Amino acid sequence: MSNNYLQEPIITILGPTATGKTKVAVQVAQHLNGEIISADSRQIFRRMDIGTGKDLADYSIGEITIPTYLIDIEEPGIEYNVFRYQQAAFDAMQKIRKKNKRIILCGGSGMYIEAILRGYRLFPVPENDELRNTLASKTDFELIDILSSYKSLHNDTDTSERDRLVRAIEIEEHYKNHPELNERVKPIDSCIIGLCGNRDEIRSKITKRLHERLKEGLVDEVQRLINEGIDPQRLIRYGLEYKFVTKYIIGQLSYDDMVEQLNIAIHQFSKRQMTWFRRMERMGFNIHWVDIALPNKEKMNDICSFLSKNGINI
């Protein structure tokens, strides 16, 4: 394997829930000397294991365990957002690069993935009164010219209203004066692999997995979190398993209603994930879709062929 592969694109593995992303990412990491960064908005929380589907055993192949980042990094009950995730992911990428390993981003949280690959500018930018006073005497056309001196204007989002124009210039000036921030929000080139499958097959997997998680102790897991003192309303805001199981525990749903409504909600979530990924494609991301029904060897051959054609030294 060439030692200059750190100049290659990172590898992203995405897909809706129940498509086996983790197992694929682990195989790719083992084959390509990589380490994994999780892109899951709820797996960051400790002791939220069954409901988030951490499946930690999947990160091991035989006696080899693939190092994985951004799992179990925060206590349940806190607020977490895309900005905090983006910064944590940047730090994780730096650690992986220092170890001379490949970076594999893996998960189903489309906004988290997009924040990394597009380099969302999420740092809080304070108001600059001195700059605003200077801009107050400018016409809208002059403000547009000033903004265009910072960046190419591909749409009219920032130029449709004067307040937006001023704020956009303020943000650009802030980043100009703080170049260290730009380093953390650069768009990242990535070979993106998407896992997909027959809709009925995925629906079946979702329902089967839900019943397995209930047998594994999902209700007990949520009860323990509540016993720790975590506000049930906070758990409800985490959505899906934690929302509906909490409602069952506090008496708002019967067990059967909880299972039925949760099953429907996970199916709807899966559809929303695919909608997000299709939107990414329309925005210009090239996602190579791999059928989860393929035998494992064919699946890996397909993935390696795609990566090889797109700048990854296999």
Image (cartoon, grey):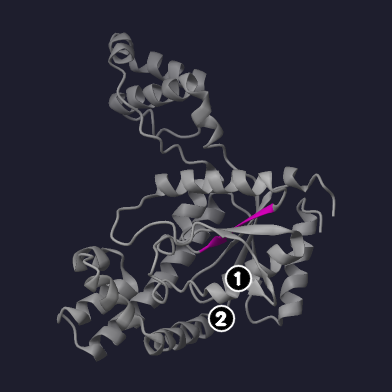
Q: Amino acid at mark 2?
A: Asn
Towards the viewer: 159 or 219: 219
Residue 104 among magenta residues: yes
Q: Quadrant of residue 221?
A: bottom left
Q: Residues within 10 Å of mark 1 (few under 14, many from 20)?
A: many
Secondary structure of the magenta portion, mostly? strand
| Residue 153 visible at all | no
Q: Residues within 10 Å of mark 2 (few under 14, many from 20)?
A: few
Mark 1 and mark 2 lie on one chain; the one further toward the N terminus is 1
Q: Amino acid at mark 1?
A: Tyr
Whole-number angstrom distance, CA of label 1 to CA of label 2? 26 Å
Q: Which residues are magenta?
A: 102-107
Q: Residue furthest left?
A: 251
The image shows residue 83, relative to residue 177, as above or below, that is below
| Residue 57 visible at all | yes
Disc 1, SS:
helix
Disc 2, SS:
loop
Residue 129 in the figure: left or right of residue 89 = left
Towards the viewer: 1 or 133: 1
Please state, as top left, top right, bottom left or bottom right, where the C terminus lies in the image.
bottom right
Residue 137 point in image, percent of width and height: 29, 8
> Could you tell me if the residues under marks 1 and 2 are in contact, i.e. CB atoms within 8 Å?
no
Residue 251 point in image, percent of width and height: 14, 82
> Residue at horizontal 45%, vertical 65%?
273
**Residue tagged 2:** 198
What mark, if any, has residue 59 been given in the picture? Answer: 1
> Residue at horizontal 56%, vertical 32%?
183
Residue 234 among magenta residues: no
> Residue at horizontal 31%, vertical 68%?
239
The image shows residue 10, relative to residue 203, as above or below, that is above
